[in-house]
Image (cartoon, coloured by chain):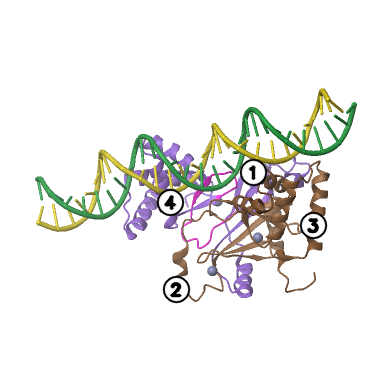
Chain colours: A brown, B purple, C green, D yellow
DNA sequence: TTATTATATGATATTGTTTATAAATAGGAT
DNA sequence: ATCCTATTTATAAACAATATCATATAATAA
């Protein structure tokens, strides 16, 4: 990493090219090609890695690079990348599926902090569930492959402007 | 509890009536009435407490008691109960919102174990996240109101018939 | 009581997201 | 060139969920 200040998704051209090449390899391994449309989609995802984009978001961004692309192709590409676990699908309860890259080498998904006041989605990169997972595997005889952990509450930016946090708990899908 | 063998949702009439009355009170507190349609819906939810029913599931079950009820009313009732945190909405990645009662007095939601092979949803009633929550609140200055924790893997019933668990990880929405 | 208002319901239409279909296109292999 | 398969585009369809609106029910006032 060139600098600790550098934003996650704003990496320079070299790292970008390397990651595109890596994804091309992953597709190739499963007999899929990195078509121009797929590459444009992948680049949009890489360039906005810190966000959690919906298919529509991706579609609009890809159209800037490749105006002729169809929405269905974006959906298919996201599904393909998802099948290969290059990205994964997330649901934050707002009615649309969102997508994010799987950190390279990460066995498990990271955790999310969702602010019920402003809607911000912050992340916990470290996996803190180790002890709990071992307990689950033992007590429930359940072989864990992945997990999702989300905390709903008030983020540090909103804490002063929220008087009654409990009132925010509502009918969100989670 | 009358017996440790008794199924959670199959409680006798007394407990049922008590819980209906309690929900009536909760609605009343917020100036809502327990109409016949709402009561029929609540009873279906109570009678199937161990399941995670979709709106359509609830609709079909309620129609057996109250054939004249409309789907929209079921949706409206589920939304209302959800707003009051009497039930909450869940998303298990199968495209439909599911609903379950909040255990009386439970501050937090319980955890789910989802089998990637058979789709079974088992539950961890205890809340094991206490230490992690304190760490999140401290390190991220995040006021936690609720959480969702789901483990995806292979349940004890399927463990013998699944050869390569990692292959099951796919493109589910979570 | 009757009139008036607010709330709730049922039937249906509409929305919005996602998937399925069919025809067109692009590369490779023969 | 022809064939073959994968991919794409545009469009239609599926689906859950919500909005609309006329009707019905319940609470309130006169
Ligand atoms: Zn916030
Ligand atoms: Zn994330
Ligand atoms: Zn199973
Ligand atoms: Zn549950």
Badges 3 and 2: C-beta atoms under 8 Å apart?
no
Q: Which residue matches tag 1?
A: A70
- Measured Cα–Cα span from mark 3 to mark 2: 45 Å
Q: In the drawing, what numbered circle is on residue B102?
A: none
Task: Respond whether the residues carrying marks 2 and 4 are from the same subunit.
Answer: no
Q: Which residue matches tag 4?
A: B79
Chain of residue at mark 3: A
Q: What segment carries the magenta color? A: B91-111
Badges 2 and 4: C-beta atoms under 8 Å apart?
no
Q: Is residue B94 shown left or right of residue B24?
A: right
Badges 1 and 3: C-beta atoms under 8 Å apart?
no
Q: Which of the two residues, A17 or B54, is positioned nearer the viewer here?
A: A17
> Which of the 4 image quarters holds residue B60?
top left
- Measured Cα–Cα span from mark 1 to mark 3: 24 Å
At horizontal 63% and vertical 59% (from top left) the residue drawn is: A149
Q: Which residue matches tag 3?
A: A19
At horizontal 83% and vertical 49% (from top left) the residue drawn is: A25
Looking at the rendered image, the quarter that the N terminus of chain A falls into is bottom right
- Measured Cα–Cα span from mark 4 to mark 1: 35 Å
In this rendering, does residue A35 appear at all? yes
Picture coordinates of residue C26, whole percent (x, y): 77, 38
Chain of residue at mark 4: B
Q: Label 1 CB, ligand 2: below 8 Å?
A: no
Q: At numbered mark 4, what does the secondary structure look like: helix, strand or loop?
A: helix
- Measured Cα–Cα span from mark 3 to mark 4: 44 Å
**Which one is earlier in the sequence, the residue at label 3 or at label 2?**
3
Give the number of marks.
Answer: 4
Q: Of the residues tagged 4 and 1, which is closer to the observer?
A: 1
Q: In the drawing, what numbered circle is on residue A163?
A: 2
Picture coordinates of residue B140, whole percent (x, y): 62, 72
Q: Which of the two residues, A29 or C22, is positioned nearer the viewer here?
A: C22
């Amino acid at each position: 990493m060139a600098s600790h200040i550098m934003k996650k998704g704003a990496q320079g051209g070299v790292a970008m090219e390397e990651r595109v090449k890596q994804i091309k390899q992953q597709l190739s391994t499963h007999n899929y090609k990195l078509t121009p449309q797929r590459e444009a989609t992948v680049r949009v995802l890489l360039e906005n890695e810190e966000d959690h984009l919906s298919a529509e978001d991706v579609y609009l961004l890809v159209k800037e690079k490749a105006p002729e692309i169809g929405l269905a192709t974006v959906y298919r590409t996201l599904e393909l990348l998802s099948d290969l676990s290059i990205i994964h699908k997330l649901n934050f309860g707002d009615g649309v599926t969102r997508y994010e890259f799987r950190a390279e080498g990460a066995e498990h998904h990271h955790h999310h902090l969702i602010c019920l006041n402003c809607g911000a989605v912050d992340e916990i990169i470290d996996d803190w569930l180790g002890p709990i997972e071992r307990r689950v595997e033992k007590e429930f005889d359940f072989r864990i492959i992945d997990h999702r952990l989300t905390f709903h509450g008030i983020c540090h930016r909103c804490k002063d402007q929220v008087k009654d946090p409990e009132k925010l708990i509502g009918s969100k899908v989670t």
